[in-house]
């Protein structure tokens, strides 16, 4: 009798598992069909600005200031994201000599030209934590002494062209409205509500939760050993593009970073210091762009959608070299803390486009001004007296980096 009961329970359990598997397969298939339909081209090549975007932006600025205050340390107000830097280092950005004519726009208009730049490498969290914690990693690049009228009229940034990136190809919100809902929940300490705002399944953002979890990745061996993406789109002359920075060790002398002690809280800074300051080995990258093909689903207003690289491959436009240098001094670290990066520190040829980029303009400007005022930070001069003296700051994994 007992044997018969166990056999009956086994058959019942098997049927239940088979039923669940079938339901899962049907759900997966339906989801694939839905997203294949939803994420299909063609798409617009123009921006589409919702009527309530300005009001939502004001609310997001209030939430950003709240987060800045929540994570301040005893003496300084930190960034609302990317608070922990691994270092700010000097870099040379050389436009490729054989660059295609269609890409010769803005700072890439003169093949072979070399721009001096500052590069800030960071973790994404709004509060400094151990590097081994799963997190986004950011790179911000500021080209110096760039002539021409900029989109933002601040005299402090009149000679700058900024690129702000982090190490995932898609963002975890689609637009300013979703960003407001998500960010407000995080500011209130309600991380679950950020993706499940109500009991109504129609409001759940499971796909965006998956993107957010992928964004929180294990630390690379070194900050110069990962790819950094713009996430949101930009202009390049008349083109709509996304850009990224990829490691290019083939452009540098061979170098093998010694194994790092990942239990140390700042091992990514240590890795950068080991390579640039102790071993005097340069780091190399390439700056690349990806053109929008509007016949396919490459939207401007939804940065949660990764543009298909098979349909539109990335093309290199410049080489970035970080030469050997000493960067880990008190003066340079303070200088790094006062730097301001903003994708709107840009020539019109590189104008940011899309809702998240429009949001960045207002939020970055407001949070940067608030942080510098609270810290009583003067216009930041470089750690050495050179043409590289600039004032700057960078905010946001939330908004990109």
Image (cartoon, rainbow, N blue to C red):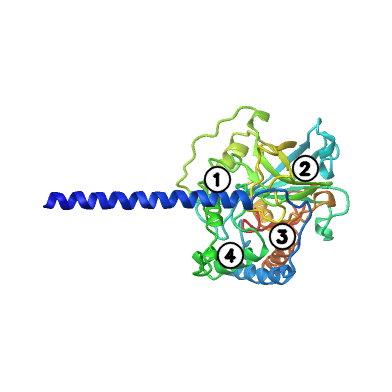
Compare marks 3 and 4 and give the one earlier in the sequence. 4
Question: Mark 1 or 3, which is nearer the eye?
Answer: 3
Secondary element at tag 2: strand
Mark carried by residue 182:
4
Give coordinates of residue 152: x percent, y percent.
82, 59
Q: Are marks 1 and 3 in contact (CB under 8 Å)?
A: no
Which residue is under mark 1? 268
Residue at 43% across / 51% down in the picture? 24
Residue 95, quarter of picture: top right
Residue 92 shows in the view: yes
Residue 101, quarter of picture: top right
Task: For marks 1 and 3, give the CA distance.
Answer: 33 Å
Task: For marks 3 and 2, give the CA distance.
Answer: 30 Å
Secondary element at tag 1: helix
Mark carried by residue 116:
2
* Label 4 crowd bin: few (<14), some (14–19), many (20+), radius 10 Å: many
Compare marks 2 and 4 and give the one earlier in the sequence. 2
Rendered position, 287 above or below 184: above
Which residue is under mark 3? 355
Compare marks 1 and 3 and give the one earlier in the sequence. 1
Compare marks 1 and 4 and give the one earlier in the sequence. 4
Q: Are marks 3 and 4 in contact (CB under 8 Å)?
A: no
Task: For marks 3 and 4, give the CA distance.
Answer: 15 Å
Give coordinates of residue 329: x percent, y percent.
63, 49
Secondary element at tag 4: helix
Residue 216 shows in the view: no
Compare marks 2 and 1 and give the one earlier in the sequence. 2
348 and 320: which one is in front? 348
12 and 46: which one is in front? 12
Residue at 59% across / 30% down in the picture? 255
Horizontally, residue 234 falls left or right of residue 222, namely: right
């Amino acid at each position: 009798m007992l044997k018969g009961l166990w056999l009956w329970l086994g058959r019942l359990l098997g049927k239940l598992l088979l039923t669940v598997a079938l339901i899962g397969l049907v759900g997966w298939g339906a989801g694939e069909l839905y997203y294949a339909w939803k994420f299909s081209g063609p798409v617009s090549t123009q921006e589409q600005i919702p009527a309530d975007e300005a009001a939502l932006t004001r609310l997001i600025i209030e939430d950003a200031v709240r987060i800045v205050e929540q994570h301040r340390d005893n003496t300084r107000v930190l960034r609302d994201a990317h608070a922990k830097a691994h270092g700010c280092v000097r870099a040379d950005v050389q436009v490729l000599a054989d660059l295609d004519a269609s890409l010769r726009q803005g700072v890439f208009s003169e093949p072979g030209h070399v721009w001096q730049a500052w590069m800030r490498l960071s973790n994404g969290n709004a509060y400094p934590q151990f590097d081994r914690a799963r997190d986004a990693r950011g790179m911000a690049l500021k080209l110096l002494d760039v002539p021409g009228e900029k989109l933002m009229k601040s005299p402090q940034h009149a000679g700058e062209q900024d690129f702000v990136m982090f190490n995932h190809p898609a963002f975890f919100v689609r637009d300013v409205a979703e960003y407001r809902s998500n960010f407000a929940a995080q500011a209130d300490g309600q991380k679950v509500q950020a993706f499940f705002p109500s009991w109504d399944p129609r409001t759940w953002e499971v796909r965006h939760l998956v993107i957010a979890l992928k964004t929180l990745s294990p630390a690379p061996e070194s900050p110069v050993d990962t790819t950094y993406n713009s996430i949101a789109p930009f202009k390049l002359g008349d083109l709509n593009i996304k850009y990224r920075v990829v490691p290019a060790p083939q452009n540098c002398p061979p170098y093998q970073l010694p194994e790092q002690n990942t239990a140390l809280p700042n091992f990514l800074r240590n890795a950068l210091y080991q390579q640039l300051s102790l071993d005097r080995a340069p780091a190399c990258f390439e700056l690349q762009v990806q053109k929008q093909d509007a016949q396919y689903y490459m939207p401007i207003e939804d940065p949660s959608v990764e543009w298909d690289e098979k349909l539109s491959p990335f093309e290199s436009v410049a080489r970035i070299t970080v030469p050997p240098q000493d960067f880990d001094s008190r003066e340079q670290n303070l200088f790094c803390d006062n730097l301001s990066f903003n994708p709107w520190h840009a020539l019109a040829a590189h104008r940011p486009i899309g809702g998240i980029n429009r949001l960045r303009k207002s939020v970055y400007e407001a949070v940067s001004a608030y942080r510098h005022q609270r810290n009583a930070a003067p216009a930041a001069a470089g750690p050495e007296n050179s043409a590289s003296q600039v004032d700057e700051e960078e905010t946001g994994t939330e908004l990109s980096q």
